[in-house]
Image (cartoon, rainbow, N blue to C red):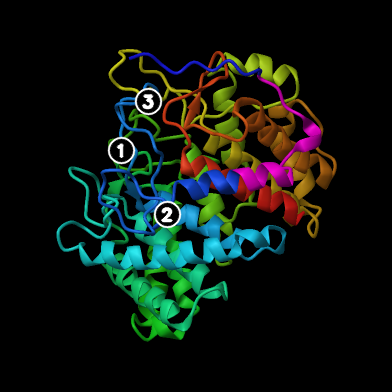
């Protein structure tokens, strides 16, 4: 299968990092992937509120994969950023449009949940009309992320009372499911490995912790039960530490040697999306979290030939999902080798922006960042501004390899040009997360 070829120059302007114009364009590109009455997929039964992962289908030249489905995890992560943008005065022109999207998402979730007797409520991929797609996997981080997104919506102040009540009912459905399966094995976020995953445990733990703050949920599920669940999950998360100074992605017995089971960008995503105030041992600013993130970055430096050129000009390194990944977005071309992902670089930027924000009030974090990352990036880290500059390296890398704000899933490990499925919604959501965290600084 022939790949789309890109010929735009690989360039970037450090003066336009996360510019208002770029962020606005990215919001629009993300908005294009949300099903609405004025934005339906031709020939596909759809409901407003569904969010496609990408508009790519097998007939397109860039892939043999179909991404025109609603993945629960991707949609919940996207909704988190939609809500954040809708609340900002900076992008007030988007508020009414995005408030409508939030309402539709809540209604779409109700439809999805009504079909959960046909499959598990943890089923990861759904048709755009709210019915389960064929032959997919259970990934229990999905309902947990959906709870987090719904609580974001309830707390946003953007919902009518009727929609707010529907959101609360949706949360109860997902909460009741998770209390019964929270320690069950399931597939990881890359839909490749079945087992016990750090990301899944940390995200469910956050969902329970968020629900624990509301009487409406602790009356529904006794608070003591939620506390026990949280404690069990923290015991499980301890197993990802044993014998190492970093968080191991997957701890399923007999899984050693399975792809991505050790150092994996999904642990960094867990630190970003699963942060709660309890038990600081698992917080994003701990030595172990920094050791994990540094180990992930270090594992990719020699993985991609592209890093030689980008790091020579103070960018990157470019990051993928995990070392020796062989998914390139096109499985029938007999040339299967993984590439950098936009979500990975954007997530790394968001990590440094979060750490920089914490370091503003806790300067002891600065030497900790220095000890773990100075050798990786070949630069001294002596101030909050230096930590911010590490995040900037990754956002500028994104802006070097995108095409006027368009972001695919991956870009070529050698040439740096985009490849795989186009306009990946998750790429846009992670960029907006990083831009939001940087603006807050």
Residue at the spot x=37%, y=21% of the render?
A: 61
Q: Which residue is mark 3?
A: 327
Quadrant of the image for the C terminus? bottom right
State the image quarter where residue 314 is shown.
top right
Q: Which image quarter: residue 407?
A: top right
Placement of 319 over or under 79, stated as above or below: above
Q: Is residue 243 visible?
A: no
Place of residue 127 in the rendered image (x, y in percent of width and height, measured from the top left): 26, 50
Q: Which-is-in-front pick, marks 3 and 1?
A: 3
49 or 324, which lies in front?
49
**Tag 3, which secondary structure?**
loop
Which residue is disc 2 drawn over? Answer: 38
In the rendered view, would you say 213 is above or below 328?
A: below
How many numbered tags mark residues here?
A: 3
Local packing at callout 3 (Cα closer than 10 Å; few below 14, some 14-19, many 20+) is some
User: Distance from label 3 to label 1 (Cα)?
Assistant: 13 Å
Which image quarter is the N terminus in? top left
Q: Is residue 188 left or right of residue 240?
A: left
Depth check: 40 or 425 in front?
40
Cα distance in 3D space between marks 2 and 3: 34 Å
Q: Position of residue 331 (x, y in %)?
A: 30, 22
Considering only vertical position in the picture, is 10 above or below 264? above
Residue marked by disc 1: 193
- Disc 2 is placed on an element classified as loop
On whether residue 33 falls in the magenta region, the answer is: no
The magenta stretch is 10-25
Residue 288: horizontal and vertical position, in percent? 59, 46
Residue at image position (74%, 52%) is: 439
Residue 419 coordinates in the image, percent (x, y): 47, 23
Question: Could you tell me if residue 225 is visible in this image?
Answer: yes
Judged from the image, the secondary structure of the residue bearing numbered disc 1 is loop
Q: Considering depth in this image, is 412 or 9 the residue closer to the camera?
A: 9
């Amino acid at each position: 299968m022939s790949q789309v070829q890109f010929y735009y120059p690989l360039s970037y302007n450090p003066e336009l990092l996360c510019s208002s114009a770029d962020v606005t364009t990215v919001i629009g590109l993300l908005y294009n992937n949300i099903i609405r009455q004025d934005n339906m997929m031709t020939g596909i039964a759809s409901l407003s509120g569904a969010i496609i992962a990408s508009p790519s289908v097998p007939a397109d030249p860039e892939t043999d994969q179909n991404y025109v489905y609603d993945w629960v995890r991707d949609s919940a992560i996207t909704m988190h950023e939609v809500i954040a943008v809708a609340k900002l005065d900076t992008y007030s022109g988007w508020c009414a449009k995005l408030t409508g999207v939030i309402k539709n998402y809540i209604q779409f979730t109700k439809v999805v949940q009504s079909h959960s007797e046909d499959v598990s409520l943890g089923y990861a991929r759904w048709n755009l009309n709210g019915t389960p797609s064929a032959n997919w996997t259970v990934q229990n981080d999905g309902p947990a992320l959906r709870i987090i997104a719904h609580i974001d919506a309830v707390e946003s102040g953007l919902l009518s009372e009727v929609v707010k009540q529907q959101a609360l009912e949706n949360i109860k459905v997902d909460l009741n499911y998770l209390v019964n399966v929270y320690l069950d094995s399931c597939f990881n976020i890359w839909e490749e490995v079945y087992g016990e995953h750090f990301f899944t445990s940390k995200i469910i733990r956050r969902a329970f912790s968020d629900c624990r703050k509301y009487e409406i949920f602790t009356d529904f599920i006794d608070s003591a039960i939620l506390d026990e669940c949280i404690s069990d999950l923290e015991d499980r998360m301890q197993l990802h530490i044993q014998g190492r100074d970093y968080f191991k992605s997957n701890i399923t017995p007999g899984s050693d040697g399975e792809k991505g089971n050790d150092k994996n960008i999904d642990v960094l995503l867990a630190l970003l999306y699963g942060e709660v105030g309890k038990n600081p041992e698992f917080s994003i600013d701990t030595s172990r979290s920094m050791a994990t993130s540094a180990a992930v970055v270090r594992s990719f430096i020699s993985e991609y030939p592209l890093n030689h050129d980008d790091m020579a000009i103070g960018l990157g390194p470019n990051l993928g999902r995990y070392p020796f990944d062989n998914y390139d977005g096109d499985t029938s071309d007999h040339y299967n080798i993984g590439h950098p992902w936009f979500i990975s670089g954007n997530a790394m930027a968001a990590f440094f922006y979060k750490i920089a924000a914490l370091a503003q009030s806790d300067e002891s974090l600065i030497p900790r960042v220095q000890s773990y990352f100075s050798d990786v990036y070949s630069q001294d880290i002596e101030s909050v501004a230096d930590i911010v500059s590490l995040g900037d390296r990754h956002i500028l890398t994104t802006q070097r390899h995108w095409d006027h704000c368009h972001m695919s899933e991956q870009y070529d490990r050698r040439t740096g040009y985009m490849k795989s499925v186009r306009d990946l919604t998750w790429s846009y959501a992670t960029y907006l997360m990083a831009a939001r965290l940087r603006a807050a600084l």
